[in-house]
Image (spheres, rainbow, N blue to C red):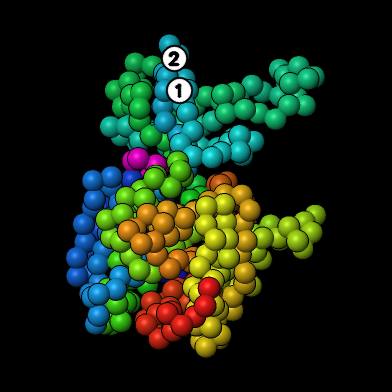
Amino acid sequence: MFEIDIPKLRQCCSTPGPPGYEHRIRKLLTQWLEPHVDELYTDNIGNLITHIRGRDSSRRVALAAHMDEIGFIVHHIDEEGFVRFYPLGGFDPKTLTAQRVIIHGREDILGVMGTKPIHLMREEERKQLPKIEDYFIDTGRKRDDLLQYIAVGDPITRERDLVEMGDCINAKSLDNRLSVYILTEVLTRLAETEPPYDVYGIFTVQEELGLRGAYTAAHSINPDFVLNLDVTIAFDVPGAQPHEYGTRLGHGVAIKIMDATVVSDPRMVRFLRQTAEKHQIPHQDELLPKGGTDTGPLQRAGRSGAISGALSIPTRHLHQVIETAHKKDILHTMQLLYHAALEIHNHPWADDPF
Ligand SMILES: [Zn+2]
C-alpha cells in the first residue's frame, strides 16, 4: 500500500532546518502538501499546520512531527577565518570528530570540524573525551573571503548524504526527517479520503531545544486526540543486554508507552495495539526513560488536554550523522498511522477505563 520514495526521503533529510531556522524545510513541505490538503498555514512561531476536513468537524485529531534537526550557530569568526559555534540541540561531542558541516549564510559554505591532532596531545589530553568547545570549523577560507558569505548568528547543519545499506536507510537527521517524510506521505493519502474527524498535520519547530513549537501548536489547535511521530533509540547492537535495547530494528513500529515528557494515555496505547493487530502490522513497545518528545506538550497544552500517544521509528546511532532505520519499520509506521487516523472514531473512548 505504501512505498518508500528514496529520492523524496533524501531531499527531506538534506534540506536544512536547525532549531529556529526551519524556513527551508518548511518551504519544501509546503510545496509537497499544499496541493493535497484543505488548508495550510504557518503560525507565528513557525509551525507548519495542515488541515484535512473530516466527516465530523466537532473533533480534532493532531498528527505531529518536529521538522527541526540538531545543528549549531556561529558565535565567533577569528582573524584567521576559523569559526567557533554553539550547539542548537543535544550533541555528543565525540561524534563531531572529522565531520563536514554546512554554514548557512548568504550562501551555503562547507567546512570541517577541526580539533587538536592526536600527535600534539599530551598524555592526559589523549585520555579525555573531547568537549564541544574544543572544536572549530575550518572552511578553507580566509576571514575576509568568508565574511562575504557568513556572519555571527548563521545556523550550521551537518553534511552527509542518504545511502541504502541492505534493508536499511542511513543518513543524517533521520531524527526527525524520517517522521516528517512519513507524515507527509500519510497526510497525502488521508487527503484522498474523508477521515472521520478533522485531521491536523503539524510540523513543529524547535523541538530539539525543549519542545518549544509543540506547546504553541497544541494551544491553538486544541486537539482531542494526538499521535506524535519521532524516532527512538534502537540499541540492539553488540555488547548490549536485551533489557537495554529500547527497541530493535526490523521488529515493527514502536508504540510509545512513556518517555521523559509523557505517559501515553493507556486508552491510546490499547487502540494502537488493537489497530496494529487488526491490520497485521508488526509492532513493539517503547519506553524511553531519558529524552522527551513533543508528545508531552501536545498532550497537555490544549484546553482540556488530549488523548495522546505516539509512534516511534526504531533508529540506531541516534544524534549522529549515521542514523540507521529499517525500511520495514518505516512502512509499518506509515500503515499504522494511516489506519489509526481512519479508525479512531470506532474505539469506545468514553467506555474504555483508564
Ligand atoms: Zn526527534
Kindly identify which residue carries mark 2: 78
**Main SS class of the magenta portion in the image:** loop
Please say whether residue 108 is one of the residues in the magenta stretch: no
Answer with mark 1 or mark 2, whichever residue precedes in sequence: 2
Q: Is residue 156 above or below residue 143?
A: below
Q: Foreground: 90 or 353?
A: 353
Q: Position of residue 23 (x, y in %)?
A: 29, 46
Distance of label 1 from label 2 (alpha carbons):
7 Å
Q: Is disc 1 placed on a helix, strand or loop?
A: strand
Q: Residue 85, image x and y in percent?
A: 47, 26
The three-letter code of the residue at mark 2 reads: Asp
Specify whether tag 1 is near ligand 1 (CB below 8 Å): no
What amino acid type is highlighted by mark number 1? Val
- Quarter in which the N terminus is drawn: bottom left
User: Left or right: 295 with respect to 193?
Assistant: right
Say which residue appears at 33% left-offset and 41% top-offset. 21
Q: Whole-percent x and y of residue 22?
A: 33, 45
Residue 44: numbered disc: none
**Residue at 45% across, 43% down:** 210
Residue in the image at 31% along x and 27% along y: 149
Position in image of residue 112 (x %, y %) = 51, 32
Q: Residue furthest bottom?
A: 278
Q: Quadrant of residue 225?
A: bottom left
Region in magenta = 17-21
Q: Tell whether 140 sits left or right of 254.
A: left
* Residue at image mark 1: 83
Of the pair 134 and 64, the residue shown nearer to us = 64
